Amino acid sequence: MSETPFSDLAQLGEQLERTNKRGELATLLASFLKGLSPAEVPPAVRMTIGQVFPEWDERALNISWRAVMTVVDDLTDAPPEGRAEARAVDGGELVRTLLEQGRRQPPAPPPLTILGVFGTFTEIAETKGKGSRARKEALLRELMARATAVEAKFLTKVIYQEMRHGVSEGIMLDGIAKAAGAKTRLVRRANQLWGDVGEVALVALTEGEPGLQRATVRLFRPIKPMLAQTADDLAAAFEQFGGRVALEYKLDGARVQIHRRGDEVRIYSRNLAGVTGSLPDVETEVKAKLAAQEAIVEGEAVAVDAQGRPLPFQHLMRRFRRKHAVAAMVEEIPIQLHLFDALYVDGESLVDAPYRERWGALERATGGSNLVRRLLPRTVEEGQAFAEAAHRDGHEGVMAKDLNSTYTPGVRGKSWLKLKHVMSLDLVIVAADWGYGRRHGWLSNYHLAARDATGEYLVVGKTFKGLTDDEFQAMTERLLALERGRKRGTVLVQPQVVVEVLFNEIQESSQYRSGLALRFARITRVREDKSPAQADTLQTLRELYERQFQYKGRPA
């Protein structure tokens, strides 16, 4: 069987972009998958949704946008980037337009294949050390020189995981089930446990339902984390769970999943990326305190000050991103580990066990150490007092969990609810960015500003969250009427529109002249009743920022 041309995958992408019905998308995917050889299935499936490797695979392409544009410039005599960029909805479409307008030479032989592209991507990801940047760019240039304009568009989209054709992982799983004639629930279950949609597709197409039914928890193969819905009312959580509720501190840290077999410990982030090297202190603590010899446990890593109080989240991220001089950073920003779930202990999978049993297994596996603070409240009032204590201790709020709930990997179900302490400010929109994908054609990323003592509006954050499609459209028309200039994809506007913004924390920022930035900002309503002069000031933000340290730690 000859190798499938990469052009077939690129044309599939074009077809998907012209379709918006879930069933039709799944049918197109199923038809394509049936025509692939087994070896082609995993890379084709992953690349279709913008992945090269499984989520838990630590390899990454690390190709800059500048490198892509340098290669495209070498291949073309196209007009300046800006003119094409104004019409392009994303980077892939821009590359296609530039190649169509001014390519010097036709694509070089031989034609690209799916396996050939995957092999080159793998070589790029595995290129390390001195001269690696030049080698990566040479490999990229070879791909682009052999690619048609449509293929180059798709290559770019894969590199930046910016597909914008409507095929999420969920729709891909529908397509896999249709192609294999397998039950969708079995396909989804295998993906939740294996964390590799490519392997799921291969097993489904080659072994069918019997192969999928063998899916189980594997050590050192991270499981997609169970997700929580947001709730505002603790009383509603009590009612929803029939009083069978556990409350846990919702910590302002980073979620981690820890796998252990004897002296081998690996730590994974919420996104299934390996972070063991950045957290040697956590690794040591797990080896010393985890009683179970084989385990998969979940918890939160929290940065703390010398007194053990939680530091703002941005300081934790300095630890997670650190790859060099880690020992010094361990001293500067210590980490506390708080565990809240057990998914596997000494040969027993606990994914399908109720939460109350998983907690019991966690207590036994840890000997009761490093557990998140937890309460089984008898009344709503008792629960509210616990939530207030969480805030005083410097944390985000509480998690409410149904004691009878099983673990649902990768699903944002109704069995876990997060109740966060939130703050509100009235801010002024001073600019907005043109949106991409579904929001193309709308001003949909709003620059939020507060007035300083001189009357100048200084940006303290951006958000595209909180508005409906109709509200995006109406806001676009309103802001264009207030336009006072443009900078590339950003429209500068007169400071007239006031919006109420909810957020969880104020952080220091070197990005904004204000020196501050809102975390998790989202617009809750337009304040038609307020003028810009009545909006909150930068002084108010600074006071709120300082007030946070009544409960949080302050970095040295």
Image: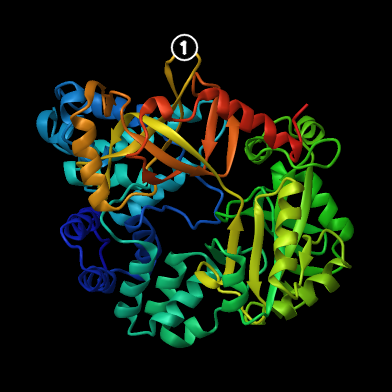
Residue 298 higher or lower than 150, as above or below:
below
Q: Is residue 134 left or right of residue 363?
A: left
Q: Amino acid at mark 1?
A: Thr
The spot of residue 419 in percent (x, y) is 60, 59
Q: Is residue 414 above or below residue 229?
A: below
User: In the image, 293: left or right of 417?
Assistant: right
Q: Is residue 415 above or below residue 251?
A: below
Residue for point 31% across, 36% down: 142
Q: Quadrant of residue 320?
A: top right
Q: Which one is in front, 190 or 341?
A: 341
**Quadrant placement of the N terminus:** bottom left
What residue lies at 41% left-to-right and 78% top-to-bottom? 204
* Residue sitting at x 18%, y 38%: 477
**Quadrant, the C terminus:** top right
Q: Where's residue 3, x and y in %?
A: 27, 61
Count numbered badges in the picture. 1
- The residue most toward the left is 101
Residue 216 seen anywhere in this rendered image of the structure: no
Q: Is there any visible trace of residue 33 in the rendered image?
A: yes
Q: Position of residue 135 (x, y in %)?
A: 44, 31
User: Residue most toward the front?
Assistant: 529
Color encoding of the figure? rainbow
Residue 532 at x, y percent in the picture = 37, 27
Q: Which residue is mark 1?
A: 454
Viewer-closest of 96 and 399: 399
| Horizontal arrangement in the rendering, residue 406 relative to residue 391 (left or right) | left
| Badge 1: residue crowd in 10 Å (few <14, some 14–19, many ≥20) | few
Asked if residue 358 lies left or right of residue 117, the reply is right
Which of the two residues, 308 or 276, is positioned nearer the viewer here? 308
| Residue 61, quarter of picture | top left
Is disc 1 placed on a helix, strand or loop?
A: loop
